[in-house]
Amino acid sequence: MEKWFEKQSRLVQILLLFIPVVNWVVEVLVRWSHALRKGSLLKYIIAILVTVFGIFIGWLDMIWCLLFKHLILCD
């Protein structure tokens, strides 16, 4: 899911992260995909936090994605 998200245009990424319920689903799928692929403790902690607070983190990620073209701590 992480690779799919990164292949999307920046406009599509921003729109996916802007819509509240959609941003939570995208955040959870991308973060868990990234955590399972990388396997570090920090990535798992972030994935758990996103599962609980995903909507708020999703909006932060939307701003981060606008500035840096990737999600926070997901490069």
Image (cartoon, helix red, strand yellow):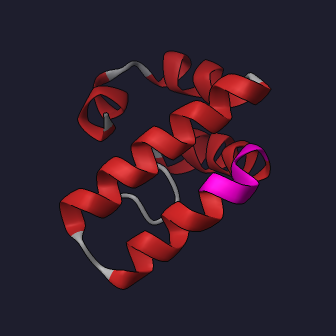
What is the quadrant of the C terminus in the image? bottom left
- Is 21 drawn above or below residue 31 in the view shown? above
Can residue 70 be seen?
no
User: Who is closer to the viewer here, 42 or 14?
Assistant: 42
Residue at image point 45% right, 66% down = 73
Most common secondary structure along the magenta stretch:
helix
Image side of residue 18 versus residue 36, left or right: right
Horizontal side of 38 relative to 5 (left or right) equals: left
Residue 11 % position (x, y): 54, 18
Q: Which residues are magenta?
A: 51-55
**Could you say where residue 48 lies in the image, as x and y percent from the top left?**
56, 65
Residue drawn at 63 percent across, 66 percent down: 49
- Say above or below: 75 vs 4: below
Residue farthest along the bottom direction in this orientation: 41
Q: Residue 44: percent from the left, percent from the top?
A: 42, 71
- Above/below status of 59 relative to 52: above
Q: Which x, y percent locates residue 29?
A: 44, 39
Q: Is residue 52 magenta?
A: yes
- Is 21 included in the stretch rendered in magenta? no
For this orientation, the residue located farthest to the left is: 37
- Residue at 50% x, 62% y is 47
